Image (cartoon, rainbow, N blue to C red):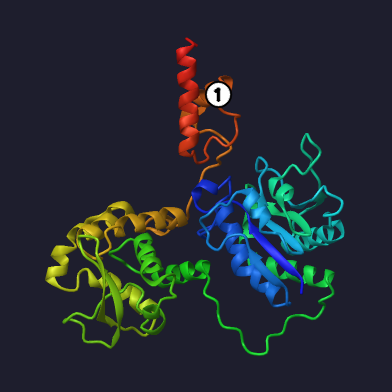
Amino acid sequence: MIKILLDPGHGGGPGFNRGFKQVESLPYCNEGDCNFIYARDHLKPALEAYGFSVGMTKASIGPDPSLKARGSMGRGYDLLISCHSNACTGGVRGVEIWDSTNPKESIKPLTDKLCSSIATTLGIPNRGTKYRRNSSGSNYYGILRYGQAKHNFIIEHAFHDNLQDATVYRKTLDKLAKAVAKTLAGYYGLYKDPAPTKPADVVLTEDKFIQTLADSMRGKDLSILPSVTMAQAILESNWGKSELAQYGKNLFGIKASNDWDGPIYKKKTREQKKTGEIYTVVADFRKYNSWAESILDHDKFFTSTPWRQKNYARVLEAKNYKDQAQALQACGYATDLNYGKKLIQLIERLGLQQYDKGVEKYVTRDITKPADWAKDDWQWGIDEKLTDGSNPGGPCTREQVISILRRYDEKQKLGK
């Protein structure tokens, strides 16, 4: 059996956006997140359908293991495929693959086939198999330098800072994965198309779950901001996978209090005291016919009794997701002491604020150009060698801020 290790490049969240153009209102429009969703939810199952044994260098979207750690995981695998998308000033398009410069690891006949297949599937230029060495003559890219699979290579599927490439790539993940899997299967002699013996279970990916929520709220006059509703559904139901979400169609953990005269789903649940102590009880929860019904009832819940209208007044009056998330916690909606913080983190990591009232499309500016108000300061930073002049609108990490401040402090001490 051929063993393939998939390496979703970079970590999750906006810190790994790296110039990824926002594609309409779709989630996961940053490099780290998109790499992971593509590898885990599309490419892995497509390869497994052909009989490949497939591993991943990380199990969840957030972490960013070191290149050395990722590479060492390749030991015992036939292929280590590092999944990426590319960036180059926004004016370049196409697919390219970086193969290992080590002749024993190089697998150019396969990478050439993959380039051709990806270019055809996405309708983008084929930039071919490429090689790059560092000053010592070994692989320039760390994942190839440290890769311990029999063959290691990086697929740069498209240029995500080019809106045309980003759009076709982000909207074609499943079709792309199946084309890549078919090419790999053909290379290794697995020519028969995968044919499951029974209908495959519908896999509710995180991407599809968010879209399901968005579709259910579209055109509805809601009291709670869509971003907050989505974050609550994700947090309370574990992306729709919880027992209550599956069998009770209850996405928000709303209990069946005395004013509820509908069906009930009984289950164990964990609660948290103000002291932080966690305990388990058996409780009655509201049961619905569908998630859409759950979403509408969740919105009505906050105004369904005079007491709730008064208690949740701060929630209903909030005008932005941060205030509303914090108000939910302050008003006692959940016993989790970090409930508001968790909602805000989910909204900002997934970009859910794009769905809020008055926001039809999430707009991001070109991060390769400084804003008008910052042009003079940005040029000063280039002249002072505080920046290399790239991506002025990109996210800045804390360590980068500290580095800049330290450089400035050193110049001040030298009287410059």
**x, y percent for residue 372:** 49, 30
Image point (52%, 38%), residue name: 393
Which amino acid lies under the numbered mark 1 shown in the image of this protein? Gln
**x, y percent for residue 26:** 52, 60
**x, y percent for residue 283:** 25, 81
The N terminus sits in image quarter: bottom right
Image point (36%, 79%), residue name: 244
Image point (30%, 60%), residue name: 339
Q: Does 321 appear above or below 190?
A: above
User: Residue 81 or 259: which is nearer the viewer?
Assistant: 81
User: Residue 278 or 207: which is nearer the viewer?
Assistant: 278
Q: Does 302 appear above or below 294?
A: above
> Is 233 placed left or right of 77 in the picture?
left
> Is 91 placed left or right of 368 in the picture?
right
Q: Is residue 323 visible?
A: yes
The 10 Å Cα crowd at callout 1, few under 14, some 14 to 19, many 20 or more, is some
Q: How many marks?
A: 1
Residue 332 falls in image quadrant = bottom left
Residue underneath mark 1: 379
> Is 295 placed left or right of 166 in the picture?
left
**x, y percent for residue 79:** 75, 62
Q: Does 36 appear above or below 127?
A: below
Image point (50%, 52%), residue name: 13
- Residue farthest to the top, as pictured: 415
Q: Secondary structure at mark 1?
A: helix
